Image: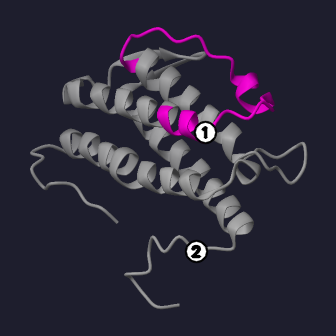
Amino acid sequence: MLTTSRKARTDAQEFIEASIVFLKDDFLPKLVHCLEEMSDDDIWWRPNEKSNSVGNLILHLRGNLRQWIVAGLGGGSFERDRDAEFETRARVPTAELITIIRSAVNDAVKIFESLQPERLLDRYPVQTYSTSGLQAIYHVVEHFSYHLGQILYIYKMRTDIDPGFYSHLSKR
């Protein structure tokens, strides 16, 4: 696990930095690795119509980051069609999926970096909610982790490869 710089002087600063480390330095590289190693057929495969493909999950993660952080905390504009994130069957090219998820993460990180720690308890409108900045960030990081786990499971199932992200910790 990657850790923070240990330069934070408050809990709020540590929370913001940890959120950046998780999203940008830990989760995103793992996600990109999977995308780069999977075929288009694997990225858009779904076991049944009630399940999501990796491609749909990427579109969904982008929508979540943009709605909760870029528009919610950052005050930017974003028109989201959440249902379309899951319904899309058109195969968005892998390079485009990587570009859109990197862009969404980088835009969210910029907002995290500019957020004053004392504003974490301010309320922000997101979807139908009035949520604190802390809760919005916590939700987005947790949500990204949740779907990354699904993507890793599909990656292993479709490629029969362990990406070795934790091989330095133990020999299994």
Q: Nearer the viewer, residue 4 or 167?
A: 167
Can residue 5 be seen in this snapshot?
yes
Residue 80 placement: quadrant = top right
The amino acid sitting under disc 2 is: Asp
Q: Residue at x 44, y 75 (%)?
A: 166
Residue 140 in picture, x, y percent from top left:
48, 37
Q: Residue at x 61, y 15 (%)?
A: 128
What is the number of the mark on residue 58?
1
Q: Nearer the viewer, residue 29 or 2?
A: 29
Crowding around mark 1 (Cα neighbors within 10 Å: few <14, some 14 to 19, many 20+) is many
Q: Residue at x 37, y 81 (%)?
A: 168
Crowding around mark 2 (Cα neighbors within 10 Å: few <14, some 14 to 19, many 20+) is few
Reply above or below: 74 against 113. Answer: above
Indicate yes or no whether the magenta region holds residue 78: yes
Q: Which residue is mark 2?
A: 162
Q: Residue at x 36, y 17 (%)?
A: 74
